[in-house]
Image (spheres, helix red, strand yellow):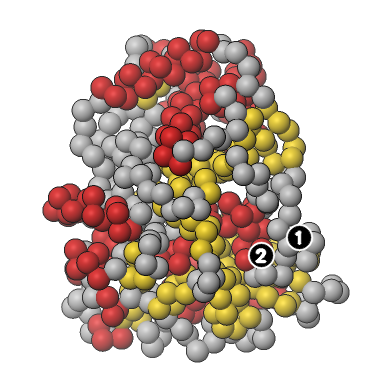
Amino acid sequence: MSGSSILVIDIGTYSVRVMLLDQNAHCLFQARQSLQLKRLDENRVEQDAQVLLQHAQHLITKTTQQSSDIIAAALAIQRSTVVAWDQTTGKPLCPALSWQDTRTKNRLKALRKYADDISHRSGLVLSAHYGAGKLHWLREHLQTTDNHDTTLYGPLVTYVLHQLLDQQPFLIDESNAARTQLWNIKQRCWDTELCRLFDLPENTLPDCKPTMHAYGRLKDTNIPLQAVCGDQSAAFLGIGRLPADSVTINLGTGAFILAPNPKMIQHPMLLTSIANSSNAHIDYLMEATVNGAASALQWATQQWKIKDLDRQLPQWLSEINDPPVFLNTIGGLGSPWWQSGIEPRFTDDDDICTEKNPATAVVAIIESIVFMLAYNLTLIQKTLNTAINRCFVSGGLVKLDGLCEKLSSLADISVIRVTQQEATVLGAAYMTGKLKLFEPSVEKIFMPSKNPGLKNRYRHFCKCIAELNTQTTI
């Protein structure tokens, strides 16, 4: 294989991928290995950090053998997963606590009175999903180990960097630091008050660097790692150069709306995150999350024993025009409600969803995803005081024309499905500075059409959500 190339390491929740790209963003080689997630119960979700690392090391070795001219590397990784490991041996001292793990939610109740200040400082709603509470839990539960003096604690990205790079640095990038709920989103540093509230010594946290930075060289190679970032930050950049009136939505297990936020405007029920950063500059995003996207369809498949859902769903979406309204609380309500403990249900007739009639129920679930996206889009527009006319969508669920059509009609925007299947990889590669930012590659554009029934169901959905009287998620 000839010509200069870029190595990208993509560590997600369910797989590790390593790819080689040329400087025109063409894939030259890729290797992939699946990962397992262990759900112990509703709140405890773990992952084997040692297996994850071994897969990454193996795939890097396999991929680097394909080219003798790799000029830069980038790492994109799942956010908010944390782990503890021995500094000397590099071995994890426990399973990694997944970003989905919320075992500390009851303990965080004591911090509710500080929720506004925590949000203002960190840009995040007080939640057990983020790293701070889980890091405290690890420190508390590993205090008695014999090798406590050599124990390091940090987000998964810090563990991976410590093991993959020469000289084993103790580092984190700003996009992952911003997901710990310990990092000051305005001052770009660890926040002393947040560390105090979560009872975590500030001097035990990794050194924080911009996403675009010379992190060091990969072990046993001469390849410089020049970009490190969270997966959603990379996916945002990987769509390409966006018009000013645009946002992106990545529709996978969850759905993430990402809007450029140049003035770093904050909303107490939306999130502030980072697209990319250098020593001299930082690009902020306003972020909204829908927890129950593809995960809600997986729930339905198990609940009603649906077979061949992927094959049947496009036809169901085209034929069923008046589904019931579904309160999609799969994984808990995300922004801007942040509520948990609510059973998913249909607002009028729970009997509609039986194993004999799954089609109507599943279409209702698709509409519930659209409803939550539209609600957040409206809130983002109001908060940023800007018009959003175009939405670029990527991820597994956007292959459904019916979903894209409904979102366009309800939100009254153009929904643009892009061809980029590897947005995370492309975005990470762009941060190395070796790849030019390109224009989005459009597959199909969906324009708004009149759908009064959809809008009536949306109003009913909003009314039912407003009437919920449950405890705020922490």
Label 1 Cα neighbours within 10 Å, binned few <14 / some 14-19 / many ≥20:
some
Q: Amino acid at mark 2?
A: Ala
Task: Report, in whole angstroms, how far the alpha carbon at label 2 lies from the one at label 1.
Answer: 8 Å
Residue 327 image point, x, y percent: 37, 25
Q: Nearer the viewer, residue 116 or 29?
A: 116
**Left or right of residue 206: residue 279:** right
The answer to whether one can see residue 267 in this image is: yes
Write down the residue under mark 2: 429
Q: Are marks 2 and 1 in contact (CB under 8 Å)?
A: yes
Write down the residue under mark 1: 25
Q: Nearer the viewer, residue 121 or 56?
A: 121
Residue 190 image point, x, y percent: 33, 70
Q: Nearer the viewer, residue 428 or 310?
A: 428
Q: Is residue 459 above or below residue 332?
A: above
Label 2 Cα neighbours within 10 Å, binned few <14 / some 14-19 / many ≥20:
many
- Residue drawn at the location 47% of the way across and 20% of the way down: 364
- Residue drawn at the location 72% of the way across and 78% of the way down: 71
- Residue drawn at the location 58% of the way across and 51% of the way down: 236
Q: Nearer the viewer, residue 464 or 382?
A: 382
Whichever of labels 2 and 1 marks the residue nearer the N terminus, that label is 1
Residue 317 image point, x, y percent: 60, 19
For residue 349, what is the image quadrant?
top left
At numbered mark 1, what does the secondary structure look like: helix, strand or loop? loop
Q: Is residue 292 above or below residue 284?
A: above
Residue 423 image point, x, y percent: 64, 52
**Left or right of residue 314: residue 274:** left
Q: Amino acid at mark 1?
A: Ala
For the N terminus, which image quadrant? bottom right
Q: Is residue 387 above or below residue 262?
A: above
- Residue drawn at the location 38% of the way across and 77% of the way down: 206
